[in-house]
Amino acid sequence: MTSAEALKRSEKSQNLKVFHLEDSPWYYVESEEGKICYKVCYESDTEYHCNCADFAKGFKNDQNFKCKHIMAVMNSITEGDSENVHYLERWRPKLDESFIKKIDDKDFVLYSGLLDVAHQKNLISVDVELIQFPSDDNKQTAICKATVKTFDGKIFADIGDANPQNCNSKVAKHLIRMASTRAKARAFRDMDNIGMTALEELGDLNEVTGNKPHAHTQSDNVKPFIKPVKKAEPVIPANAKAETKEEVNVSNETKPKKTKVAKPGNGNGNGTAKTEKVPLMSEAQKSALFNLSRRRGFSVEDIEKRATEKYGVPVEQLTSVNAGEFIRYLQQAS
């Protein structure tokens, strides 16, 4: 069976309903017309059978042949609480809500979330081409073109630009890198069918809040100087009892002194410490990871060992970004 034929059958399998007999390897897959059900026995990627004519004909010539009914079972997961039969809800790519940030009542998606959904949709390649190098002639504007491709042959492309005027001052020195990220984000948005703007596409949060930008881009970290207020000397009435210098000193010493409690700082002098919570691996990534390891013949112990050697943590503690890298690593591993 050629790859083109396999892709065609895989697309047809997406719309088939699957029913599972509880505690057994037997499944019933509804036909495209919905009139009959085909009986499928599926125990593993190498042990399966279907009573349809397509499987009987194809299996004679190719021992790895899979009909669309078998593919429908492979693309499904068991859900439900019925007594004897479970309807299998087909797994679909989904954007985790942790990748959505709300700013001024507007939702924005993180680049890491777009990449997560792209891997769920079987992303196989990302190519970035530098179209324009930043120079004085083009006002230091870098332009990149990103092309992404899925397993089923679909291709999406878009461009991204970056210059000191549309970038935050902290990343203004990395224009090519920023243009590349924006191009990939826009291509992933088309691929993932996500209409929200990526947070990395914004040049400044003023674009969202509606505030006027500063006259100079490097003034983001400049804080206004507040002139200290000098305390006024206490006014002593003329008819009040005059205090000697010794009495004043004694009264000042008896007053309790206020102790200033130092606030923990982050080393930059602003007295605040912020820690960003790194999102862990999503359920979709976890499912894709273990399905891939099963198809590649990796045991659970082997996956745990590889994750520990590569990232120093077990599989369950991988971050979303590390999980994406680990999936690509397993796809290339023999």
Image: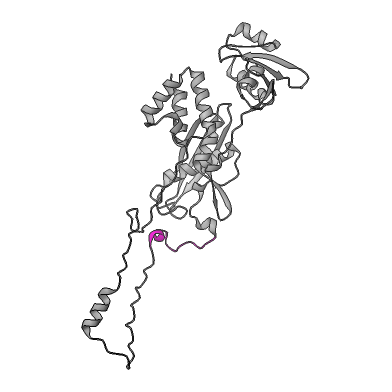
Q: Which quarter of the figure is the C terminus placed in? A: top left
Whether 334 is drawn above or below 195: the answer is above
Q: Residue furthest top?
A: 60
x and y, in percent, of residue 39 in the image: 69, 14
Report the label total: 0
Whether 262 is drawn above or below 285: the answer is below
x and y, in percent, of residue 12 in the image: 67, 23
Specify the color scheme: one colour
Residue 213: within the magenta?
yes
x and y, in percent, of residue 21 in the image: 67, 18
Question: In terms of depth relative to the viewer, which is nearer, 130 or 14?
Answer: 14
Q: Which quarter of the figure is the N terminus placed in? A: top right
Whether 74 is drawn above or below 268: the answer is above
Q: Residue furthest bottom?
A: 239
Identify which residue is drawn at 51% across, 48% down: 199
In the picture provided, is 109 more to the left or to the right than 267?
Answer: right
Question: In terms of depth relative to the viewer, which is nearer, 323 or 161?
Answer: 323
Whether 238 is drawn above or below 17: the answer is below
x and y, in percent, of residue 141 in the image: 45, 50
Q: Residue furthest left?
A: 246
> What segment is highlighted magenta in the picture?
210-222
Question: In terms of depth relative to the viewer, which is nearer, 314 or 167?
Answer: 314
Q: Residue 222 lies in what quarter of the image? A: bottom left
Residue 122: within the magenta?
no
In the picture provided, is 286 more to the left or to the right than 62?
Answer: left
Q: Residue 315 lies in what quarter of the image? A: top left
The dominant secondary structure in magenta is: loop
Residue 16 can be seen in this image: no
